[in-house]
């Protein structure tokens, strides 16, 4: 059995960011994940407090939380090697006045350019590059295993993994996306983890330069990605299937071409789908689990896992270190449910 360390279950953006944050604060960490596709890899990578706040017409408090998430990104990216691209983001569509009004009311700088509204408040990462950088920063501390059981032994945890010896942990962080709770999780924690709502999202990857910066509009966005662009993304609550859905592809393409104002020449589009997890109020659950001393959650960032990754990581790391909760930590506390 390995020496006590902090075990993070799940290597999506929340698990990897939390592991990175803990490691840079001097903790020994190990991440377990069986590998394969996850929502984090499928995402468009927009770190978009302004557009997300305006499109979802959020409260000023939520906009401030999104902004706090974005503000952690430059230092987080510099320390982890994640490439953060600063580029404008644009909204086009009939409701430009409404989006412009919400951006301004929520304190985001935005300007009208003809029939569009443009903001420089958002930025973007590339999920593949970001995940590779975060993994590299962990110096091989990612174990390709599924966590199959959790047991509390005195003031430590044992994390059972398939095909290997149990890992001894001083603390455990569950960052398992929309998967079922690891067997052995205490009752109240299990209820929270199993209650994470799945929201399927489909996205298309195009090997063609369609736009230099994210362009959003009713029903779709088009965003740049190395070697081309992505067309996204649906919000399909209750669906967990990840095979591309042809009817969904058709709808997304129509909406995307409307947003761009043109249908490009015939394109080859690789369609992908991922399943985001959401809590009942749409904010992540980050911090101490409701039961089980030494058990923590990093779950359910809904549409904003990349935007909020560093914030969730810092809130969870603070909770593990027993620091006084920040206002953001109070908003994300899993025990609010
Ligand atoms: C189409 C689409 C576009 C998106 N675009 C954006 C965007 O532009 N900007 C943005 O901020 N967000 C975006 N998102 C949302 C973002 O991708 C999600 O919020 C985020 O990826 C969720 O991260 P996560 O770490 O919670 O979960 P996941 O990425 O799903 O990772 C969970 C991990 O846990 C592992 N796991 C589960 N159970 C176990 C176990 N028992 N043992 C070990 N490992 C386990 C899984 O294998 C998985 O790797 C998008 C999502 C989709 C689907």
Image (tube, rainbow, N blue to C red):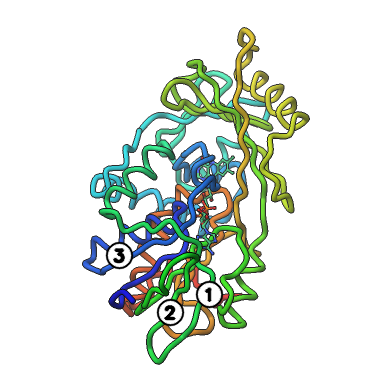
Crowd rating for badge 1 (residues with CA inside 10 Å; few <14, some 14–19, many 20+): some
Q: Is residue 207 left or right of residue 71?
A: right
Q: Position of residue 303 (x, y in %)?
A: 57, 48
Q: Secondary structure at mark 2?
A: strand
- Front residue of 47/234: it is 234
Circles 1 and 3: CB atoms closer than 8 Å: no
Q: Residue at x 38, y 73 (%)?
A: 167
Q: Is residue 290 left or right of residue 256?
A: left
Q: Secondary structure at mark 1?
A: strand
Q: Residue at x 41, y 36 (%)?
A: 126
Nearer-N-terminus badge (1/2): 1
Q: Which mark is residue 158?
A: 2
The image quadrant that residue 194 belongs to is bottom right
Callout 1: CB less than 8 Å from ligand 1: no
Q: Residue at x 62, y 65 (%)?
A: 180
Q: Is residue 241 in sight in this rendering?
A: yes
- Front residue of 210/103: it is 210
Q: Is residue 124 in sight in this rendering?
A: no
Q: Which mark is residue 149?
A: 1
What is the C-alpha distance between the residues marked 1 and 2?
8 Å
């Amino acid at each position: 059995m390995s020496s006590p360390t902090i075990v993070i279950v799940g290597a999506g953006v929340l698990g990897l960011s939390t592991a990175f944050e803990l490691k840079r604060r001097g903790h020994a960490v190990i991440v377990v994940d069986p590998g394969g596709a996850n929502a984090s890899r499928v995402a468009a990578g927009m770190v978009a407090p302004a557009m997300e706040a305006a499109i979802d017409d959020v409260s000023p408090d939520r906009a401030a939380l999104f902004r706090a998430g974005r503000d952690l990104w430059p230092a987080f990216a510099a320390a982890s090697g994640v490439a953060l691209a600063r580029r404008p983001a644009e909204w086009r569509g009939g409701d430009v006045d409404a989006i412009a009004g919400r951006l301004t009311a929520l304190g985001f700088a935005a300007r009208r350019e003809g029939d569009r509204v443009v903001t420089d408040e958002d930025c973007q990462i590339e999920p593949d590059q970001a995940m590779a950088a975060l993994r590299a920063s962990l110096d091989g501390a990612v174990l390709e295993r599924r966590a199959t059981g959790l047991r509390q032994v005195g003031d430590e945890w044992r994390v059972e993994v398939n095909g290997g010896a149990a890992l001894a942990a001083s603390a455990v962080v569950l960052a398992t996306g929309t998967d079922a709770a690891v067997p052995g999780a205490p009752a109240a924690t299990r209820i929270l983890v199993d209650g994470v709502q799945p929201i399927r999202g489909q996205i298309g990857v195009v090997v063609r330069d369609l736009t230099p910066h994210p362009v959003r509009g009713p029903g779709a966005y088009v965003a740049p990605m190395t070697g081309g662009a992505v067309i996204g993304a649906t919000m399909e609550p209750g669906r967990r299937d990840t095979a591309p859905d042809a009817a969904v592809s058709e709808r997304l393409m129509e909406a995307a071409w409307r947003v761009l104002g043109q249908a490009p020449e015939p394109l080859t589009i690789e369609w992908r789908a991922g399943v985001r997890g959401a809590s009942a109020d749409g904010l992540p659950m980050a911090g101490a689990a409701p039961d089980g001393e030494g058990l923590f959650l990093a779950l359910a960032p809904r549409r904003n896992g990349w935007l909020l990754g560093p914030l969730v990581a810092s809130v969870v790391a603070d909770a593990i270190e027993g620091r006084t909760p920040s206002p953001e930590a109070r908003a994300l506390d899993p025990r609010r449910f």
